Amino acid sequence: MSNQQTVTTASPASWIDRPMILPAILALYLIVRLVYAASLELVPDEAIYWSWSRHLALGYFDHPPMIAYLMRLGTMALGPNELGVRLAAAALATGTAFVTILIARSVLKSTWLIGWVTFVWLTSPLLAGIGTLFTPDTPSLFFSAAALYVAIRIAVMSDADPSLAVSARAARPWIIFGVFAGLGLLSKYTAALLPTSVALAMLLAPAGRAHYRKPWIYLGGIISLLVFSPVIYWNYKHGWASFAYQFHHGTVGEMPQAGPTSAAGTVMRVGKDLSNYLGGQLAIYTPILFVIAILVQIRCWRRYSQLDLVDRLLLWTGSLPFVFFGLMFIKSHRGEANWPAFAYIPLSILTARWLAKKFDGPRRNWAIGGARLAAGMWIGLHVLIWPAVTEKIVGIAASRHKHVPHAITDLVGWREYGRAVALKWPGPEIYYPVANRAQDAAEASFYMPRQPEVWCDGIGYRPTAFDYFDAQPDFTKIRGVMWIGTSVANVKLFSEKYGYVEDSISSLYFPSLGNDRTYRIDFLERPPEVKH
């Protein structure tokens, strides 16, 4: 493909160029995101990240610190409530849509196709999910999209004027690219795939290789590392704990195989993992658009030598994350469907450039059909996650003892949980509240009145970010603990470690949490010292 666009059909999407129409649509999109941000209970991961925001640091065990900083800013502005926690998520999702539209305007000549890309992303279930539930993917997606926009601008200018690469005009965009790439790394480690893809695309194109003969592209890389350097320093001070955990988390399964596996078993396992991975992608990007994106990638790789720098850049930045996370899914036998989310920004633009070559007949019909299906799934998602609807679904399933995916049960029940824990708690002067799992500690802390600190001691489980917070409670000196957990064995381990004895036991039953979850509440006390 080249920069030449062949769409000549009268554009039904000319609304995209009307003054104030696009700002109005983006404002409406932001309002929808804010309404949902204020209405949904925090899911466990969000509550954990909120607990980080109360212990600001240069890094955390699970992820880089960007999400904690953004949550802290949101709660400072609007208070420690759901809207305050998710304020930045709503803004960044809207910003991601806007940046994607800017990329489309940079490389597409057809108003119709710019409007198509706009419609696809404003009705994207993927972007809606990332903009509703605040996870590290939200800032990572935005900053990576911004970095891609700068790289695309460099590629457009390089294709039009090859002398740009060896001129000082290239310095500023590469510096800006380095800043955005570094901010992406401060959000999520896998944001490194974006600068890696850009570097490979530049290296494997004549117009791109010219940039390697001047210092600006290297300067961009240095700046991105400088922006990321606080996380490197935190890992250095903490035994490289976060880097090691994420490498293990992404590449090694939770449950190792019991013994050697036959060749047939290996093939079946790979097939199952691959089908699970692809099934997740079909769901988040929607089936028709996903299939079109795969076909476009195959076509472009087969004609790679004929592509200009812009198309190569879009192809690499779209393909590398998709392939990388697919391989990690197969290797570790698990993963989240949203992990390769960024890939679909360049792939949507690449798809539009492919459509421009012959935008009539089947291509046009499939493009319109894919956009319509995405819009339908977007509406369905918003109906499903509205609290009254989710609570009804979970309630019916619980009454019939039916399993419900945790993605649904995680949306409801936490306010009830926080109130119930508060009713069991005699107060901080008697018992210090501690949960065995980070999500239980964070949800209790957020939804208990006055939001007291609820610590997590993950004894019996894997380490958590609580283990690396600077301010650690000294349980050897705390007289009493209210333990919140589900494992009898783990509370015994905790008691033995710190010298507590069990004073009394209570329980909390929640049919809406994790499919009939019962919490064990243990009140632990330090035995009185024996006087000699």
Image (cartoon, grey):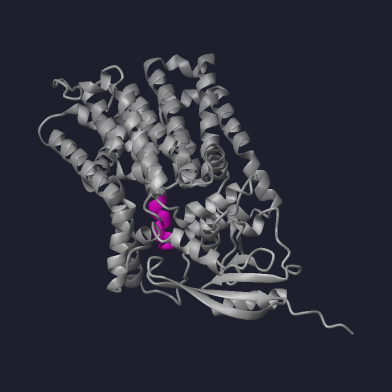
Q: Position of residue 473 (x, y in %)?
A: 71, 61
Q: Is residue 163 above or below residue 91?
A: above
Any part of residue 150 in sight: yes
Identify the image quadrant of residue 531: bottom right
Magenta run includes residue 327:
yes
Q: Please tell me which residue is depicted at 70% across the width and 53% down the height of the picture.
A: 470
Which residue is drawn at the image coordinates 27% and 73% (left, top)?
Answer: 400
Which sits in the foreground, 513 or 373? 513
Image quadrant of residue 225? top right
**Magenta-colored stretch includes residue 317:** no
| Residue 357 horizontal/vertical position (percent) | 20, 27
Q: Quadrant of the N terminus?
A: top left
Where does the C terminus fall, quadrant-wise? Answer: bottom right
Between 332 and 263, the one lying in front of the other is 332
Residue at position x 60%, y 56% in the image: 452
Question: Is residue 403 depicted above or below 66 in this figure?
Answer: below
Q: Main secondary structure of the magenta part?
A: helix
Task: Measuring from the top left, give residue 344's x and y in whole percent.
Answer: 34, 40
Q: Please name whichever residue, 144 or 215, is drawn nearer the observer in this view of the structure.
A: 144
Range drawn in magenta: 325-335
Task: Please state which of residues 63 and 440 is positioned toward the viewer in this rendering.
Answer: 440
Position in image of residue 259 (x %, y %): 45, 77
Give left or right: position of 374 versus 155: left
